[in-house]
Image: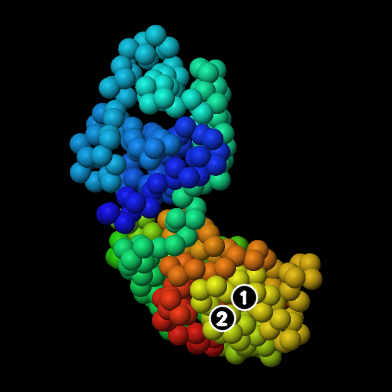
Amino acid sequence: MTERMENMDISDLLAKHKADGFMIVGNVDNADFYYATSFFVSDKYTYIQTSTAKEILVVSEMEKGRAKIESRITDIRTLQDYSYREKLKIRGDSYQAYVDCIAEILQKEGIRKIGVPRDFPYHTAQALKEEGFTIVDMESPFKKLRSIKRGDEVEHIRYTQKACEKAMAAAINLIHKSEIVDGKLLSRGFELTAENVRREIDIALLDAGCEAVGTIVACGKKAANPHWEGDGPLKANEAIVIDIFPRSKRHRYFADMSRTVLKGEASPEIQKMYDAVLAAQKEAIEMVKPGVLCSDIHNHVCDVLESHGFKTIRDGSKVGFIHSTGHGVGLDIHEAPYVGTQAIPLEKGNVITIEPGLYYPDQGGIRIEDLLLVTENGCENLTSLEKRFVI
């Protein structure tokens, strides 16, 4: 807890922007709020940090007791502390009454120039401006902090990744056990569909206290669209991209992994694609260590794939390797650092994916993805599930 409390001080950044404080007003999906407060709440909330690193959490009256127990913030206030109901009667608008309460807090704390994240609610910003406050938009002050995981965060991610692997193994096993009849995959006498496989994945994740939205089970040529979720019957002799990115329901941390499998016989073209992606991923993983630039890893992946005769995004191609090599994973599924064209050095504590892929409309898609923890001298692969194409 002490480590986290020390890390939350963003006064240097506020001084850079000449701001008196920083504020988040948002909802349950705001990862910065959870990171800063260690508190999960479904109601509207406000987090404030002053230029002297004083932190304030504003929640509804009914959440105050739980916040005192669960949140790392000690200064917890409620709307009723600032006569919310009376303000509501005067205003006749619950949102405006809420802003009035926040304005009163800011005034009493001597905050006139407020730093806010770039996704700050427009109406709140306008209402505060009308009351004489100056609003300064800032890049998330917690972005950098969140990119370097503490030990407890790594353990949360590790747990979610283990659940992800169990779900992936269940999905692959279901495909493996299917029978090939007239080019179709049958399971228990019925056509095996992407929906069947996703259901198997969801069950495994729920058993482990995790959940996933947008799971990809994409078969055949349409899988040349990297984010097509897939639907309908799965076919023999065609590559099936499975991409699972679940979140722990309790700790809120994500994990991420992809495997591509094929039931039947792979054509020489699709096998060549798989072999190239596997080789590119292997060499990229070997590069991961502190100080290595994300852009160098990405460019090397392009080098490997191009050496195998495939096109890449580096040359502006719209087929072949058409996305970045990876991304950070934590309280958001995509967060810093991004393993792409930017020359960002990796640091100990980063958790990143390495996920090269190839996509051709006449063949389909191939993607292989592992989750890695950057360590002092290299990396630890948090993904242990085998990479076997033809099953």
At label 2, which amino acid type do we have? Met
Write the residue at 60% across / 71% down: 293
Picture quarter containing residue 4? Answer: bottom left
The answer to whether mark 1 and mark 2 are in CB contact below 8 A is yes
Q: Nearer the viewer, residue 143 or 271?
A: 143
Q: Residue 147: x and y, percent?
A: 47, 60
Quarter of the figure with residue 199? bottom left
- Amino acid carrying mark 1 in the image: Ile
Q: Tell me what residue is drawn at x 65 percent, y 70 percent.
A: 295
Whole-percent x, y for residue 137 in the image: 57, 37
Q: Is residue 43 visible?
A: no
Tell me the quarter of the image containing the N terminus: bottom left
Instruction: Give the left or right position of residue 239, taking residue 386 as reference.
Output: right
- Using the image, tell me which numbered label, if any, was put on residue 287: 2
Residue at 43%, 76% in the rendered image: 376
In front of the other: 298 or 233: 298
For disc 1, the marked residue is: 297
Residue 60 to residue 356: above or below? above
The location of residue 265, given as percent across then percent down, is 60, 90
